[in-house]
Image (tube, grey):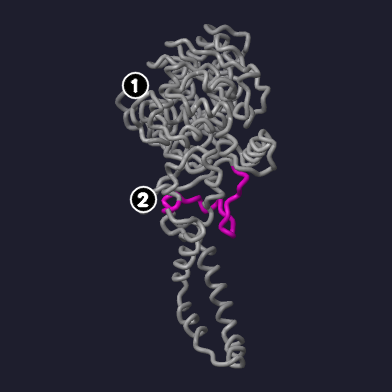
Amino acid sequence: MPSGVQYQVEEAGKALSCTAGLPRLQSKAQNGVRGDQAAATAFHQRWPAWILLWVSTLSCSFSLPASLPPSLVPRVRSSYTLGKTFLGLDKCNACIGTSICKKFFKEEIRLDNSLVSHLGLPSQDLLSYAANYSDDSKTWRPVEISRLVSKYQSEISDRRICASASGPKTCSIERILRKTGRFQKWLQAKRLTPDLVQGLPSPFLHCPSQRLLDRVVRRYAEVVDAGSIFMDHFTDRDKLRLLYTLAVNAHPIILQIFPGAEGWPMPKYLGSCGRFLVSTSTRPLQEFYDAPPEQAADIAYQLLGVLESLRSNDLNYFFYFTHVDAGMFGIFDNGHLFIRDASALGIIDKQEASQAADRTGENEDIFTCLVSGCQVQMSSCDTVPEKQNLVLVCQQLLPQLLQGKFPFPVQQEIDSALSLCSKDASTNLEVFGATSLLKNILRSLRTCDPRFAYRYPDCKYNDRF
């Protein structure tokens, strides 16, 4: 992979060729000059040409219409906007990984034009960015480039790391993390065990079982998969990247170990570069709050189905949300609903006893406090009710989708079911009964047409769809 600066200069040079007539101006401007007087005269004669060259280059680079397909976006823009510092590569190995960096620097991942300013720079304040992805530079598909946490939160986290070693505001983050007692234990470990993740704030690790952690190692996509539960194939940097990711936000790990290709309701994890991960693109649920009744019914029906699969599945894992909002769910172009953000997802192993996270002082270190501070309170693994996901969704999301959209008798039944399943005081059985009734109502309100490509035309021939 070429270095960022050299690559940008070379590509900027290539971009000049798109301005007709510029080679002639350069040639004229570079005619031999003899003597000081001749040099001065030649300079005054050619400076308009240099201005024209500069203006023409800017025009070529930045005046392309936003509607152009990704294949026509200037190479100079994509190479400049996604540099090493922007991606967080300068912070590795306190990062997610580097598995997809080549795609960025080969310009097979490009930001959506609407996110790039007239200077070719994306806003650094966003948590995620719409982009286009290609395997052959000819066909493109939409993807999402996401941070683990906001840039502001990352800066706070980095300063905490430096402060933990009584260092200045800027320091070698990797060197400090490598010296911690926790990471030294990771270096000696052959297997990822619950004691190595004790105290980390992610809900994903609140009730870790050995079976779940073995799945993490076996399916971790940032290393060559040896198909083993042992970390013999992990280098020191691989272990640090995995530990950092788990400490900051386990979302990319969940996408890797529960892939959509196996039927889990997750977008596809495509890889990472620095502190960004790349996944397939979805539109957030809140964009569908004003959807027509039949589309709202379909989305709500899918949402209840997803929650049912999180509670009851072949692997005997119980997935629960600590909280929900509309940004956590997304809809693909074919109408299929997925979990867009798994950062608030906890997992309890119903097959193998989960070991509750110990938040005592002896397990608190810099990894414990990177993002959330050191005072995170979590409920006991034994006290998470099976109704929790349904209650949260009935309180926060379904009313926004379903209220006031259907004829009176149907709307009354929907509102009654929502009222019951949204009450914290309702028992598990009461909540399950109310959502089962609601799901049956929604099933009858769904239509079978091309808008729902994920189940069309199958729905014309099979009632299951």
Disc 1 + disc 2, Cβ < 8 Å: no
Q: Which mark is residue 241?
A: none
Q: Which mark is residue 463?
A: 1
Residue that extends furthest to the left in the rendered view of this protein: 461
**Which residue is rendered at x = 57% and y = 72% of the image?**
55
Majority secondary structure in the magenta region: loop
Residue at image mark 2: 139
The quarter in which the C terminus is drawn is top left
Front residue of 396/42: it is 42
Q: Is 109 covered by the magenta stretch? A: yes
Q: Amino acid at mark 2?
A: Thr
Query: In which quarter of the view is residue 265 placed?
Result: top left
Q: Earlier in the sequence, mark 1 or mark 2?
A: 2
Q: Is residue 110 above or below residue 367?
A: below
Q: Is residue 124 above or below residue 44?
A: above
Query: In which quarter of the view is residue 180 placed?
Result: top right
* Camera-nearest label, 1 or 2: 2
**How far apart in space, not on screen, are marks 1 and 2 (Cα)?**
35 Å
Q: Is residue 90 above or below residue 365?
A: below
Magenta range is: 105-126
Disc 2 is placed on an element classified as loop
Front residue of 274/60: it is 274
